[in-house]
Image (cartoon, helix red, strand yellow):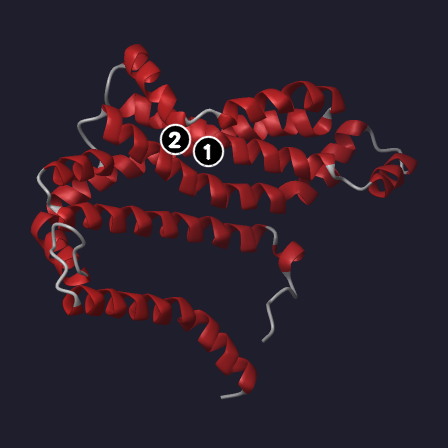
């Protein structure tokens, strides 16, 4: 095996090696200090809770994944359109951007009681909370990708007789795709945050509700099992969009592998 192959193998294995180390260290700390399970459960206790409550966890996790994906899809559709409008027009950028910053500064949990009054408890507030918390990165990144198009490229396209629409379709949009896919990786993790926030406040189903119910009975093993499930779903969705990003925008990241 060559040195380059060993480096690539180490890079691929490094997340798993770090995860194993952290789990073993966590277990050792809980064992050495005899930390009660109702305060800070060891990984073995979390695994026991997973085995005991697996059907319930899967049921609630499916609901959380559904609300997250739907809210995220709405955020992408809305954010893509608004980002294109904001990024392609300086007037709209100046008018809309301060309002979006102000809106994004409001804690989204503050919207949950309002959504409950409008739509009742359950799925709809969770979807809308996921949407509200995740659309901003899509808008900002898409607008940034379009607004930072090099003037030289625009001048070259105009000299070739291209219209503003041609420049948008043939140059601006392809160039902004790395920004767009970067925003998707951020937005999907935020969408999980929004769903779980709403489920803990105004729902009777979902991982957030399950964790809240478990904490009321001091079943911290089940609480941490819910946290682990959310983390796993977030990582999986992140990697899905990272894979799509590499396939769609490989031209922008080729040759950028870190060397060490």
Which residue is label 1 attached to? Answer: 134
Label 1: state its secondary structure.
helix
Image position of 246 (left or right of 118): right
- The one nearer the camera, 245 or 145, is 145
Image x and y of residue 166, in percent: 77, 32
Q: Residue at x 54, y 51 (%)?
A: 245
Query: Label 2 neighbourhood size at 10 Å, few (<14), some (14-19), many (20+)?
Result: many
Q: How many marks?
A: 2
Q: Disc 2, disc 1: CB below 8 Å?
A: yes
- The one nearer the camera, 178 or 53, is 53
Quadrant of the image occupied by residue 63: top left
Q: Is residue 233 above or below residue 32?
A: above
Which residue is label 2 attached to? Answer: 130
Q: Residue furthest right?
A: 159
Q: Residue at x 32, y 11 (%)?
A: 118
- The one nearer the camera, 173 or 88, is 88
Image x and y of residue 174, in percent: 68, 43
Q: Residue at x 30, y 39 (%)?
A: 65
């Amino acid at each position: 095996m060559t040195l380059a192959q060993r480096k690539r193998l180490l890079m691929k294995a490094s997340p798993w090696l770090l995860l194993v180390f952290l789990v073993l260290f966590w277990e050792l700390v809980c064992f050495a200090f005899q930390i009660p399970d109702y305060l800070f459960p060891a990984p073995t206790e979390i695994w026991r809770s997973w085995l005991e409550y697996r059907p319930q966890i899967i049921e609630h996790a499916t609901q959380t994944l559904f609300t997250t994906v739907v809210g995220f899809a709405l955020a992408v559709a809305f954010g893509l359109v608004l980002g294109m409008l904001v990024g392609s027009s300086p007037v709209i950028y100046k008018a809309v951007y301060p309002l979006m910053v102000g809106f994004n500064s409001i804690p989204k949990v503050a919207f949950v009681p309002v959504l409950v009054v409008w739509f009742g408890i359950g799925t709809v507030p969770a979807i809308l909370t996921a949407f509200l918390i995740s659309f901003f990165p899509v808008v900002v990144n898409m607008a940034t990708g379009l607004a930072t198009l090099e003037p030289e490229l625009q001048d070259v396209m105009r000299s070739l007789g291209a219209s503003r629409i041609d420049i948008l379709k043939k140059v601006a949009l392809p160039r902004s795709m790395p920004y767009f896919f970067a925003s998707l990786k951020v937005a999907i993790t935020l969408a999980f945050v929004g769903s779980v926030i709403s489920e803990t406040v105004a729902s009777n189903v979902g991982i957030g509700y399950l964790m809240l119910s478990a904490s009321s009975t001091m079943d911290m093993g089940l609480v941490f099992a819910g946290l682990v499930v959310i983390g796993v779903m977030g990582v999986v969705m992140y990697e899905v969009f990272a894979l799509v990003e590499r396939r769609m925008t490989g031209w922008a990241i080729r040759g950028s592998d870190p060397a060490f």
